Amino acid sequence: MALGQSLQQKLLQKLSPQQIQLMKLLQVPTANLEERIKEELEENPALEMGEDEDTKEADDEIKDEFETEEEEDFDRDGSEDEYENPDVSEYVVDDDGEIADYKMKDENYPEMDDKQTLPIKLENSFFDLVLNQLGMLELDERRFKIAEQIVGSLDDDGYLRRELSSIADDLAFRQNVMVDEKEIEELIKDIQQFDPPGVAARDLQECLIIQLKRKKSEGISVELAIKVLTKYYEEFIKKHYEKIQRGLDINDEQLKEVIHQIIRLNPKPGGNVGELNKAETYIVPDFYIINNNGMLELSLNSRNAPELKISEGYREMMKQYDRGNKKDKRQKEAVIFIKQKIDSAKWFIEMIQQRQHTLLSTMNAIMRYQEEFFLSGDVLNMKPMILKDVAEKTGLDISTVSRVASSKFVQTEFGTYRLKYFFSESLSTDSGEEVSTREVKEILSNMIDAEDKHRPLSDEFLTDMLNAKGYNIARRTVAKYREQLNISVARLRKEL
């Protein structure tokens, strides 16, 4: 095989470190932006928090250091021959601190004062609740450690999904307690008697049976329910009721009572307790849209974007260097370090401003595109809209719009929505009109909600109904939309 040489041209696009950081900042939700700014403040002493009374606009006349030839110097190793005469003129102007004197305020959503704090709810956690009940068992120190290990192995829903061998290994290696699986199983049975009912079950079937056994005194329907879950669990979850009735020789009325008993049970015994005691997760909206007499007003939530400025101390050090006559090697090295930190601080402030501009630009385009929805709150008024539509209106790249849409929320008078909620493909009607797939999903959901649960509508029948309304849609598409709406097939929606 002959070897040869060839000359090829390739066009490559590489993102600068600044562009990469901007992309990362765009993905940070407002709720987490404050933490990101704190990290930058800790890493860069030239960056400081601004004063509340300083609310001037950024100085447009300040040169962008990253567009000058000194960008090459910034990336070098800092040797004195490359910085023989560092230019500090741009760093000693009295008003250069104005680059960070910005703030976007919204009087309709006042910011919290620094001294204000949210109330903290102090309650016992789910694990504390179960651990406290260990005192009801007469356990020696060794068995208490085993029981404690079992409780510590429960997940947030209250289930024990760890293998007994793994629990035994943990006890042996971490606490030097040797135990066999039989002893662990005995203690698990004891813990399963604790509240909330169903705790320490290995799976849903065992969890439901434990709860039913607590209610045995309530009558024959509970005993029948235990038999159903013990012998016909698979048939029950698949709603093969005929098999259950034949196997247990029960009529429709008895089966209804069994189903009623089971659906009243709690499939997540630890869930309710955990949700009450976990720190509540609030969605912090990134935008607010207000309907002001038919005019939509958009504002950006800026409570987690505090004012930033260049350190006065660092600017003063640059001024002192500029005024000095004798500039030795040590001074030059110091001024190079200061210059780099100021450059980095200026860049970060500009990235925060660019982030805010990009967010507002994207949200404004979405608001204008879906204006009818934001005025009415009716999903049927939502227009088909894809990332490309917003990218064309804003002049941004599709990937940038995607980053904003996937991680940001907007608060409206109809609720708080993730931005990606407003994006949907189009679907043609018989009249040739383009409608949003979101509209079709809403109609599909309404059809299923209104169906006779004794005779639920099949996907084929739903397709025919949508076609009759003028929506050109295939059965497999109806099935896909139904799954996206987390709606089961007709057989599993059937009720007695």
Image (cartoon, helix red, strand yellow):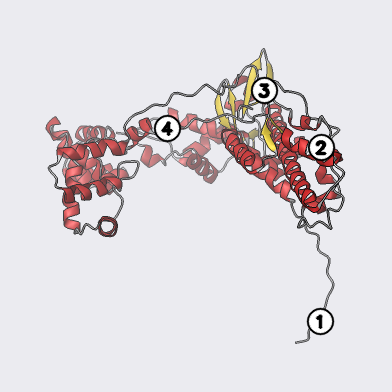
State which quadrant residue 119 falls in. top left
The residue positioned 56% from the left and 30% from the top of the image is 417
| Front disc: 1 or 2 | 2
Quarter of the image where the C terminus is located: top left
The tag on residue 194 is none
Element type where label 1 sits in the image: loop
The residue where tag 3 is placed is 52
The residue where tag 4 is placed is 279
Of the numbered discs 2 and 3, the one sitting upstream in the chain is 3
The residue where tag 2 is placed is 319
State which quadrant residue 1 falls in. bottom right
Give percent across and percent down for residue 153.
30, 48
The residue positioned 69% from the left and 48% from the top of the image is 20
The residue positioned 60% from the left and 36% from the top of the image is 33
Q: Nearer the viewer, residue 127 or 54?
A: 54
Drawn side of residue 332 relative to residue 157, left or right = right
Element type where label 3 sits in the image: loop
Of the numbered discs 4 and 1, the one sitting upstream in the chain is 1
Give percent across and percent down for residue 264.
27, 32
- Disc 4/disc 3 C-alpha distance (Å): 30 Å
Drawn side of residue 366 relative to residue 268, left or right = right
Q: Amino acid at mark 1?
A: Gly
The residue where tag 1 is placed is 4
Give percent across and percent down for residue 419.
61, 34
Q: Nearer the viewer, residue 141 or 128?
A: 141
Of the numbered discs 4 and 3, the one sitting upstream in the chain is 3
Q: Against 347, is 414 above or below? A: above
| Front disc: 4 or 1 | 4
Give percent across and percent down for residue 386.
67, 39
